[in-house]
Structure formats: C-alpha cells, structure tokens
Amino acid sequence: MEWSEELRRFRENRVRQLELMDLIRDVGSRAEGRRVKVDSTRLIREDRER
C-alpha cells in the first residue's frame, strides 16, 4: 500500500463530502424561504366538502 496514494484518496473524498455538505446547507436555506405556511389538510378538507 502506498501511503501517498491513500492520503490523496482520503483528501479527495473528504473534499467531496465537505462540498456536498455545503450544497445541502445551501439548498436547505433556500428552501426555508419557500415553505408554505398553510395547513394543507384544511385546504383538502374544504375542497372535498365542496
């Protein structure tokens, strides 16, 4: 086993993990602003009653 190759793979994987975590945080923060603050069950019930 070559330690330099092992370390290179470890660094590449770790960088990918960190980039993915940043992306997930970014998507999550953008989704916060898009959340609908309406009770969907109430809307469905009203629609069915019509």
Image: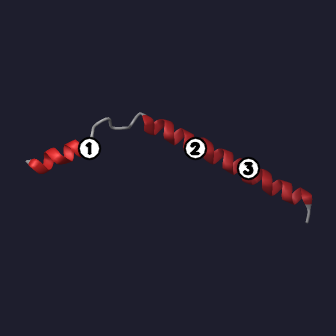
Q: Quadrant of the N terminus?
A: bottom right
Amino acid bearing label 3: Arg
> Label 3, on which residue?
14
- x then y, percent, for residue 11: 79, 50
Label 2 environment density (alpha carbons within 10 Å; few <14, some 14–19, many ≥20): few
Q: Is residue 41 left or right of residue 34?
A: left
Label 3 environment density (alpha carbons within 10 Å; few <14, some 14–19, many ≥20): few
The residue drawn where x is 17% and y is 47% is: 45
Which disc, if any, is residue 21? none
- x then y, percent, for residue 10: 79, 54
Q: Is residue 50 left or right of residue 40?
A: left
Amino acid bearing label 2: Leu
> Label 1, on which residue?
40
- x then y, percent, for residue 38: 28, 37
Amino acid bearing label 1: Ser
Label 1 environment density (alpha carbons within 10 Å; few <14, some 14–19, many ≥20): few
- x then y, percent, for residue 47: 14, 47
| Label 3 to label 1: alpha-carbon separation | 40 Å
Q: Is residue 29 left or right of residue 15?
A: left
The residue drawn where x is 62% and y is 48% is: 20
| Residue contact between numbered discs 2 and 3, judged by CB atoms under 8 Å | no
Nearer the N terminus, badge 2 or badge 3?
A: 3
Nearer the N terminus, badge 3 or badge 1?
A: 3
> Label 2, on which residue?
23
Nearer the N terminus, badge 1 or badge 2?
A: 2
Of the two numbered discs 3 and 1 in the rendering, the one whose residue sits closer to the viewer: 1
Position of residue 1 relative to residue 22, above or below, is below
| Label 2 to label 3: alpha-carbon separation | 14 Å
The residue drawn where x is 51% and y is 42% is: 27
